[in-house]
Image: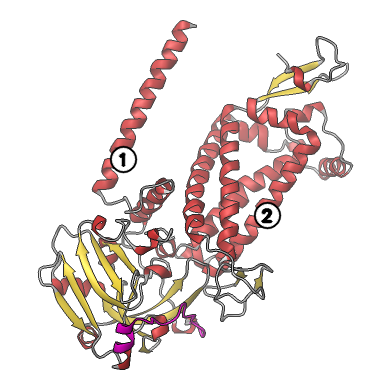
Amino acid sequence: MNNISRRKLITAGLAATAGASGLAVAGGMARRYGLIPPDHGGIYGVGETLTYAAQRILTRHSLAREFPRSEISKTPFANGAAPKEEAFLRLQHGAFADWRLGVDGMVARPASFSLADLKSYPSRSQITHLACEEGWSYIAEWTGAPLSHILHKVGILPQARYVVYFSIERDWWDSLDMADAWHPQTLVTYGMNGGELPVGHGGPLRLRVPRQLGYKSVKYITRLTVTDDLKRFGQGLGSAAPEGGYAWYAGI
Amino acid sequence: MADSACVPSYAPAVPATAVTARHSALVRVTHWITTLCFIALLVTGAEIVTSHPRFYWGEAGNVLTPPLFKLPIPASRSSVPTGYGYVLRDQNGWSRYLHFQAAWVAVLTGLLYTISILFTGHLRKGLLPAQSDLSWRAFATSIANHLRFKRPSAAEAWSYNVLQRLSYLFVIFVLFPLVIWTGLAMSPAIASAFPSAVTVLGGQQSARTIHFFVSVFLVLFLLVHVLMICLAGFSRRMRAMITGRAVTPMERT
């Protein structure tokens, strides 16, 4: 009996060591390949990390489905009211002629773009699905400048890992990893269904991220910051969403 | 050997019971992990549904679209017209975090279970019905016994009858895969990588509606499962699933 229990003990010890070192190696690899989300702490961190890592392995380059014109929803639902901020109302009064999108952080040439600048760049129109985390959705045609074009223009530094974006609405900001930032369907959007982007849907400027749920598509964006570290923003969880209890990665 | 607690007090000193191995450790551990995940998924799933208790068919749907049907419950969002004069608290954040975490644990546990029952022979011996049981007569007998609430024979304490086998197989190989598939089909990122997994279901709103109905079927299964355990002897069945041993009265010879 003594022999068997000693053998069991050794086997269990070896298995535990192998398991622990396996986890350590997996953790190191995950960090190296950027598979760990900024909100990986806390009791839901394991599930969140598994989800984000699996998505980055499976969906790094996949394209969101695009639909035929006939699928465009007749009744797109504009969630939430227009901003009541003084700054927004002033710009709205001037038909958004003075709206600017500032780009700073880890870029070679910080810049500030007007709506006219953005509209002069090569545009992309795509008919995609916008799904809210609550369960409802609609399909619309979105027109804008690919974020990748803006990033090329300002020349982002090689150590950049995230693009943080801010709404004119206080306390609404979010961030994308470089896979989504460079993604061809990530649009700095100024048009919807052939017209201007309505205020209810985020006009004059909304960052549309069609491979993630609606709350990742922040409305009324005024500033982009390129960074290698999300700890410096807010509570360090990557966006306002985890501060309100919602996941940073919204691809599911 | 036999736990005296399960033996009536007037029983002789040596009770006429037999202790047989019933459930393997793997079946017991995966059963209880799945139970915990199931409860977590059910509670959080219900919380998520209250933020939009309306269902649609096709790709898209929202409060401005006529629904396929509505649940007669209040919502946790003021934007949803429910007819109730109040709005529930928003529970979506932690519900979504926990829903996906529990889903990961459930799926990994399910994979471990499925792979192991292929190798241990549990699938063949414990779950697949015997050829002789796949007849209308065998079905009729089994259904009649259930309808008469006939207590199971001693043999059924260590093996499943044909109806149990078919229901477990249906849950393991039809409902569980379907609920995972329809859940994943709601993810915009998964839809981008595997578009046909969504279009085959009829669209993302269809996937959500099917996900809801499969969950309802799983809850029905759970209710019948627990009812059957109560009818067949709750403490004995629970003991078998916890300790792995079944204590059965000896058959009179």
| Chain holding disc 1 | A
Q: Residue furthest front?
A: A86
Q: Which quadrant would the C terminus of chain A be assigned to in this image?
A: bottom left
Res. A128 image quadrant: bottom left
Residue A48 picture location, percent across and down: 40, 51
Q: How many marks?
A: 2
Q: Is residue A80 magenta?
A: yes
| Chain holding disc 2 | B
The answer to whether dots 1 and 2 both sit on one chain is no
Tell me the residue that label 2 is attached to: B217
Tell me the residue that label 1 is attached to: A26
Q: Residues within 10 Å of mark 1 (few under 14, many from 20)?
A: few
In the depicted view, which residue is nearer to us: A28 or B158?
A28
> What's the amino acid at mark 2?
Phe
Res. A182 image quadrant: bottom left
In the depicted view, which residue is nearer to us: A44 or B108?
A44
> Which residue sits at x=52%, y=75%?
B60
> What's the amino acid at mark 1?
Ala
Label 1 to label 2: alpha-carbon separation: 38 Å
> Which residue sits at x=82%, y=45%?
B136
Colour convention of the picture: secondary structure
Residue B77 picture location, percent across and down: 55, 70
Q: Is residue A213 magenta?
A: no
Q: Residues within 10 Å of mark 2 (few under 14, many from 20)?
A: few
A66 shown above or below B11: below
> Which residue sits at x=15%, y=57%?
A159
Do the residues bearing badges 1 and 2 touch, measured as CB atoms within 8 Å?
A: no
| Segment colored magenta | A73-91
Whether residue A166 sits left or right of residue A49 in the image: it is left
Residue B97 picture location, percent across and down: 46, 54
In the depicted view, which residue is nearer to us: B40 or A240?
A240
